[in-house]
Image (cartoon, grey):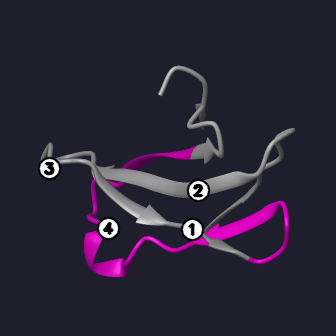
Amino acid sequence: MASADVEDESEIKDVKIVFQRETDGTEWTELRMAPLSDVYYEGTIPGREVSSGGIRYYIEATDAADNVACLPDGC
């Protein structure tokens, strides 16, 4: 499970967790994170997607003006 505090001066439109299996180079998969409050979002990568080699992921947020930011930086 991943969680994130997401804040912006404008309204948050969408928050996603984007992930990929590290060992087999599959395509990146996007899952919407659920808002649990105005700034707190939570999402779960399904267990079937996790391999013994691990996964890599980042969190991406989009605001009402379609500005996009992600963590870690440079994702």
Is tag 3's residue or tag 2's residue first in the polypeptide sequence? 2
Is tag 2's residue or tag 1's residue first in the polypeptide sequence? 2
Q: Which mark is residue 24?
A: none
Quadrant position of the N terminus in the picture: bottom right
Tag nearer the camera, 4 or 3: 3
Crowd around label 1: few <14 · some 14–19 · many ≥20 (10 Å): many
Instruction: Say which residue appears at 60% left-offset and 24% top-offset.
Output: 73
Residue 53 placement, left or right of 41: left
Is 7 contained in the magenta span?
no
Crowd around label 4: few <14 · some 14–19 · many ≥20 (10 Å): some
Is tag 4's residue or tag 3's residue first in the polypeptide sequence? 3
The residue pinned by badge 2 equals 15
The residue pinned by badge 1 equals 33
Instruction: Say which residue appears at 45% left-offset and 47% top-offset.
Output: 57
The residue pinned by badge 4 equals 50
For badge 3, the amino acid type reads Thr
For badge 4, the amino acid type reads Val
Q: Measure the C-alpha gap from mark 3 to mark 1.
A: 21 Å
Snapshot quadrant of residue 5 = bottom right
Residue 6 placement, left or right of 13: right
Q: Which mark is residue 26?
A: 3
SS at mark 1 in the image: loop
For badge 2, the amino acid type reads Val
Tag nearer the camera, 4 or 1: 1
SS at mark 4 in the image: loop
SS at mark 3 in the image: loop
Q: Measure the C-alpha gap from mark 4 to mark 2.
A: 21 Å
Q: Measure the C-alpha gap from mark 4 to mark 3.
A: 12 Å
Tag nearer the camera, 4 or 2: 2
Q: Measure the C-alpha gap from mark 4 to mark 1.
A: 18 Å
Residue 64 versus residue 15 in the image, above or below:
above
Question: What segment is highlighted magenta in the picture?
Answer: 36-60
